[in-house]
Image (cartoon, helix red, strand yellow):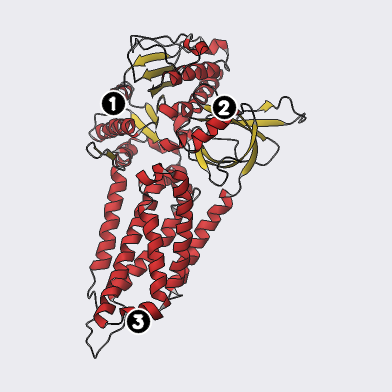
Amino acid sequence: MNLMFKAFGRRTQTSPVLKKPLAAWRLLSYRGYHIKALGWSSPPLGVMLLGLIGTIFFFAMTFGPRPYYWPHTRKISYGNSPPLATRAGWMSLACLPFVMASSTKVNLITVLTSVSHERLQVFHRWIAYAMYVLALIHTLPFIVFHIWKGDMVLQWNTSVVYWTGVVALLGQTWLTFASFGPFRKWSYEFFKISHIIAAVVFVVFFFIHCDFRLSSWDYFIASAVIYFVASLHRWDGRFCCSTLAPPCLFCQVALLKFMHRPTRWYGLQASTASFASFASAHASTTHPFTICSLPTICSLPNTNTKGKITSVLTFYIRPQGGFTTHLANHVAANPGFNMTVVLEGPYGGVDCTHLEVSTKLLVIAGGSGAGWTLPLVEHFLRRVERLQSQQQKNLPSMTVILATRDRASCIWYHEAIKDLLDRYPTSFRTSPSCLDIRTYYTSAGKGDLDTPSLSPSMQQQEVKVYPNEHAKSRMSSETRLYYGRPDLMRIIATDSTSNGDREKVGVVVCCPASMQQDVRTAVADEQQRILQGVGRSEVYMHMEHFSWVQ
């Protein structure tokens, strides 16, 4: 679908002929299911269908042809390679380039489809699972055959192929089972280092195991080219001088870059992410963080760089244990100090075309996603300011919903929005607004106005509470504060049905799994309404990977 839009332009989305096919495509991309008893949310329906098709294909190709074993006798031998093992082995080897292609941050799949690399991780894992199962199917028939033949111990003691295959399989076993979500969350740094070591061991011994048989060399060449071409982009990192200072609950990291140096950070899309490696603080590993600002140009004060200008990249990194807590403690002990940072990226982000054509934007964030919303709000403000300068009357609108359990986060977000709005002309801010900022405090009732974690100055700040959710909002420094969880499904349904036939609703989300499930369900329901002929608005959704903002 993305290739078609690139070839014929985004205006093809407005064609009535494509409205239902586009809705069907998005229904498959958005619809997911949640099993409450297991606390598990499924991938999108379309991804599960692809997984089912792949499973049927591999099992049909493996177990469909006969025989599984040659009709050996004690006197007649048809060869030492059972057909079942040979088929499974070659298919396992053929998976290797695809595992490599879906593992890198920059890859051909992302270039063609605009699907960011973190969304490809589900395919990376599933192809790796298929490769592992095929490797087991490849291994077991050889063991059965040589036990029947009575030379299993001899083969192990004399054949390099057998023990290299076992070492490769052990490395593959670690790669497979250590990649499960609970293990990754338990210790991400250990997971990443062990994953790289196990991957190197696996590929090296897998290469020796194949021993240049037939066309096996071609698969390794393809895998190496795919990986190392992507690595050229990865190591084109930027050494940046950063200033670190902790506001409120968040650790703000402002990275300064000289504009005269070649860089790809200009033209940054909203909600993009970068992988950062901090010197003297887990310098051996990189960590993904969302860039919470759009490119700006400013003078560099108090330096000897007269005439030079910089772009400022801002990250709001909330302590979540492990590295982020270590960094926050280091910043608290040394406020305002400089540190060398190596950046990789940017990666991902919301397609700005969708932001520009949407007549109604609904931005939903939870917890640490607060900072992620700021560049989206700034992009919207710039867009409205540009449209006003062109004297356009029909302005787009944006609703921002932040749900958080922390009172300090509400106050910090209130101040961040105020600072952002203060950058724009007063006449624009005081006009009837198309910007609606709603903050939901989910962990207490209205009587809980003070939080021990707040400083005295912050506790004295007033956050205005609007009892009526439908109260008219104006573009000012005030945000509307509610208590309890937002009814996301109702909000999305209301925004989708209140627009005309030509309206485009963009839903942009970065929140925990429970909120994501509600949003996915609501947006998928709207696609189903379009297919049934009762839906009016086109509804697009972008779901951001929540761990980027941790």
Which quadrant of the structure image shows residue 281?
A: top right
Residue at the extreme bottom of the image, as rendered: 75
Q: Identify the mark nearer the N-term, 1 or 2.
A: 2
The residue at the point 46 percent across, 37 percent down is 548
Element at label 2: helix
The residue at the point 47 percent across, 45 percent down is 189
The answer to the question of whether label 2 and label 3 lie on touching residues, with beta carbons closer than 8 A, is no
Question: Which kind of residue does numbered mark 1 sit on?
Answer: Met
Q: Is residue 60 above or below residue 541?
A: below
Crowding near pointer 1: few (<14 within 10 Å), some, many (20+)? some
Question: Which kind of residue does numbered mark 2 sit on?
Answer: Ala
Query: Mark 2 — residue?
Result: 332
Give percent across and percent down for residue 356.
47, 29
The residue at the point 24 percent across, 91 percent down is 75
* Residue 95 in sight here: no
Q: Identify the mark nearer the N-term, 2 or 3.
A: 3
The answer to the question of whether label 1 and label 2 lie on touching residues, with beta carbons closer than 8 A, is no
User: How far apart are the alpha carbons under marks 2 and 3?
Assistant: 63 Å
Query: Mark 3 — residue?
Result: 154
Image quadrant where one finds the C terminus: top left
Give percent across and percent down for residue 267.
58, 35
Instruction: Using residue 339 as the reference point, say whether residue 189 is left or right of it.
Output: left
Query: Mark 1 — residue?
Result: 489
User: How far apart are the alpha carbons under marks 1 and 2?
Assistant: 40 Å
Image quadrant where one finds the N terminus: top left
**Depth check: 318 or 67 in front?**
318
